[in-house]
Amino acid sequence: MHKETKINETMTISGRIQSGVGKGSFFTSLDWVVQQCEDKLGYAPFPGTLNIRVRDEDVPKLQHFLAKTDAELVPEDRSFCAAPVKKVMIKGVPAAVVLPAEDVRIHEDRILEIISPHSFKQSFGLHDGDQISIIGKTTIIKK
């Protein structure tokens, strides 16, 4: 009989910043989103999201990286869907990947939407096309 061992591992996903469609600022400004981010993530989100197009070589790691989320933003209004979030760090700043349901997702799977208490573009002088890395915890099960 083999015993499973769970190993917590830090994983890095890299990609390039790209512009979104402008809906992130609406979502991150909703009262229930702000309140739940404060309660579950420890900060109110900057009004907007940072969109990162994951580089080709990291796409295969995405499913494993995002498999275990840390919290879920649950809407009060049924016209919105719940969105699991995964805590990450970017440039030493706490952030989270927001994972809306597939039927309402406006980006392809390799585009990550990031919320944070800061605007990474303003705070770090970043622009579309700049390379950026996301660091998060994941669990590996060894048999």
Image (tube, grey):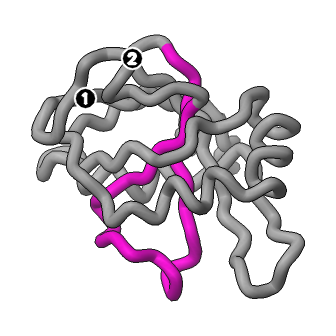
Disc 1 is placed on an element classified as strand
Determine which residue is flagged by label 1.
Answer: 132
What residue sits 70% from the left and 77% below the top? 81
Front position in the image: 127 or 139: 127
**127 relative to 114, above or below:** above
- Crowding at dot 1, Cα within 10 Å, few <14 / some 14-19 / many 20+, comes out as some
What residue sits 44% from the left and 29% below the top? 119
Residue 70 percent across, percent down from the top left: 71, 44
Alpha carbon separation for disc pair 2 and 1: 14 Å
Image quadrant holding the C terminus, namely top right
User: Which residue range is magenta in the image?
Assistant: 93-116
Q: Looking at the image, do the residues carrying marks 2 and 1 touch, with CB atoms under 8 Å apart?
A: no
What residue sits 60% from the left and 44% below the top? 86
Front position in the image: 10 or 102: 102
As drawn, the residue found furthest toward the top would be: 92
Q: Which mark is residue 123?
A: 2
Amino acid at pointer 1: Ile
Residue 71: say if magenta: no
